[in-house]
Amino acid sequence: SIIPVITIDGPTASGKGTVAHRVADQLGFHYLDSGALYRLTALSALRRGTDLADEHALAKLAEHLQCSFQGGDIILSHENVTEAIRAEAVGNAASKIATFHAVRHALLGLQLGFRKAPGLVADGRDMGSVIFPHAALKVFLTASVAARAERRYKQLIAKGISANMDDLLKDLQARDERDTNRAVAPLVPPQGALVLDTSEINAEQAVAQVLAWYAAAK
Ligand code: C5P
């Protein structure tokens, strides 16, 4: 009755979303984008005008999140918010509310529920350290700030959104700072994680490495 879990943690724009999603596809596993849960909570708070410093109110929102994942689409209270939660403002708000213990705790059960047969690939910041500490394979995906800023830049331009490289660099550094130095669930490689630096390799190569590690770990 052991349902295997592969955790992929790492900083913003390290490529973990793409890699985790593709690894899940290859193995026929379920996929958890845990960052989306923080983004959904943030979006919900922004829309309701909830004070982003009100830990208790935010935890309540997180606990009662009416969300579902349908194919590639993310639904919040019957609305397709797949695009809306990717906005920079939502990411920033997500990173702020993610510092609250009560918010993290409120999202715990929801995350554990994604573990279903035949297996799960979970991506985020604390998948291997807090949520699935007994994962079959823990990966910590990193890349230089420059490489990540360049990727984010290309993504935005491809979407027709104008972007400024200096702003992106500053934004990534600020987000890293906050995620790494927070008291609750800081972004650090979890115990037993294999570190994969993707600065010089593409998504395909990263996926191949994770699959090879998983085959060896099984
Ligand atoms: O990965 P993504 O950029 O979508 O995550 C948005 C924010 O949610 C991150 O900046 C981080 O602060 C927070 N987060 C977290 N723990 C996770 C996933 C995301 O704290 N497991």
Image: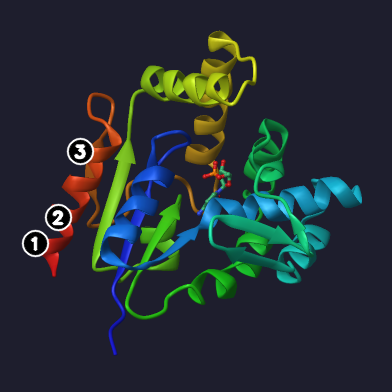
Disc 3 target residue: 205
Of 102 and 127, nearer the camera is 127
User: Percent position (x, y) of residue 183?
Assistant: 54, 48
Q: Quadrant of residue 141?
A: top left
* Identity, as a three-letter code, of the amino acid under mark 3: Gln
Query: Mark 2–mark 3 contact, CB under 8 Å?
Result: no
User: Percent position (x, y) of residue 99?
Assistant: 63, 49
**Please, what secondary structure does the residue beneath circle 3 have?**
helix
Of 142 and 180, nearer the camera is 142
Disc 1 target residue: 216
User: Percent position (x, y) of residue 18?
Assistant: 40, 44
Of 184 and 134, nearer the camera is 134
**Please, what secondary structure does the residue beneath circle 1 have?**
helix
Alpha carbons under labels 1 and 3: distance apart: 17 Å
Residue 188 visible, this angle: no
User: Percent position (x, y) of residue 176?
Assistant: 50, 32
Q: How crowded is mark 3: few (under 14 residues within 10 Å), some or many (20 or more)?
A: few
Query: Mark 1–mark 2 contact, CB under 8 Å?
Result: yes
**Please, what secondary structure does the residue beneath circle 2 have?**
helix
Q: In this view, does 63 lie to the left or right of 32?
A: right
Residue 111 visible, this angle: yes
Disc 2 target residue: 213
Q: Is residue 52 left or right of residue 41?
A: right
